[in-house]
Image (tube, rainbow, N blue to C red):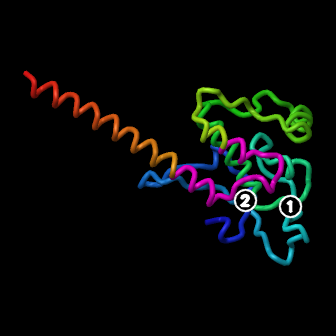
């Protein structure tokens, strides 16, 4: 919804997420959010946005004060998704200098475990791409996650059906 409203959140991190009474995820603290106004757009479709946010979730283009677009929040989402799935803090122990050298200038990213599903590894890698034009839109991210969840639910249903089927066959033989 923020993208539809032309808002760049700029501070997507675990501390700014919470749940409402219906267990829906909600964003908090819009203090760093900026409106992406068409009159501020550069010729290449990017914006000059002031640096802001939490460095470990901040996209390289904002950390280096380069023009960005709405994919900046997608980068942060990729780092956040990795953090949630890995149960780890990204770039832990990195100084500002080390972060600038490795993450911003050398495109270093946290290691994605091989055991993770290839679709998740691919999604995270695309989200935190150094090239802002190669990142998916949030609509794309939502579609990919919906498909993954659907596939997972159907796989679980098939496994349960198979289990119940084998039990009923076993029960009917006795």
Please, which residue is most extreme toward the top here?
174
Secondary structure type for disc 2? loop
Crowd band around label 2 with a 10 angstrom C-alpha radius: few (<14), some (14–19), many (20+): few
Asked if residue 124 is positioned above or below residue 116 in the image, the reply reads below
Query: Is the N terminus in the top left, top right, bottom left or bottom right quadrant?
Result: bottom right
x, y percentage for residue 51? 86, 54
Residue 145 magenta: yes
Q: Is residue 152 left or right of residue 54?
A: left
Say which residue label 2 marks.
31
Number of the front mark, 2 or 1: 1
Say which residue label 1 marks.
49
State the residue in front, 15 or 61: 61
Q: Which residues are magenta?
A: 123-146
Asked if residue 109 is positioned above or below residue 24 in the image, the reply reads above
Q: Residue at x 60, y 31 (%)?
A: 87
Residue 66 magenta: no
Mark pair 2, 1: CA separation: 14 Å
Q: Is residue 40 left or right of residue 36?
A: right
Q: Residue at x 71, y 48 (%)?
A: 127
């Amino acid at each position: 919804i923020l993208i539809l409203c032309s808002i760049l959140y700029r501070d997507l991190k675990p501390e700014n997420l919470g749940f409402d009474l219906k267990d829906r995820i909600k964003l908090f603290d819009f203090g760093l959010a900026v409106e992406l106004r068409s009159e501020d757009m550069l010729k290449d479709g990017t914006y000059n946005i002031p640096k802001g946010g939490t460095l470990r979730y901040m996209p390289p283009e904002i950390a280096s004060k380069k023009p960005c677009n709405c994919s900046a929040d997608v980068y942060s989402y990729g780092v956040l998704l990795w953090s949630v799935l890995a149960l780890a803090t990204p770039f832990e122990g990195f100084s500002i200098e080390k972060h600038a050298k490795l993450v911003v200038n050398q495109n270093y990213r946290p290691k994605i475990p091989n055991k993770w599903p290839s679709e998740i590894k691919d999604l995270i890698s695309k989200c935190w791409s150094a090239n802002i034009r190669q990142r998916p839109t949030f609509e794309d991210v939502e579609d990919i996650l919906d498909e993954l969840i659907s596939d997972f639910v159907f796989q679980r249903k098939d496994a349960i059906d198979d289990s119940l089927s084998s039990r009923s066959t076993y029960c009917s033989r006795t």
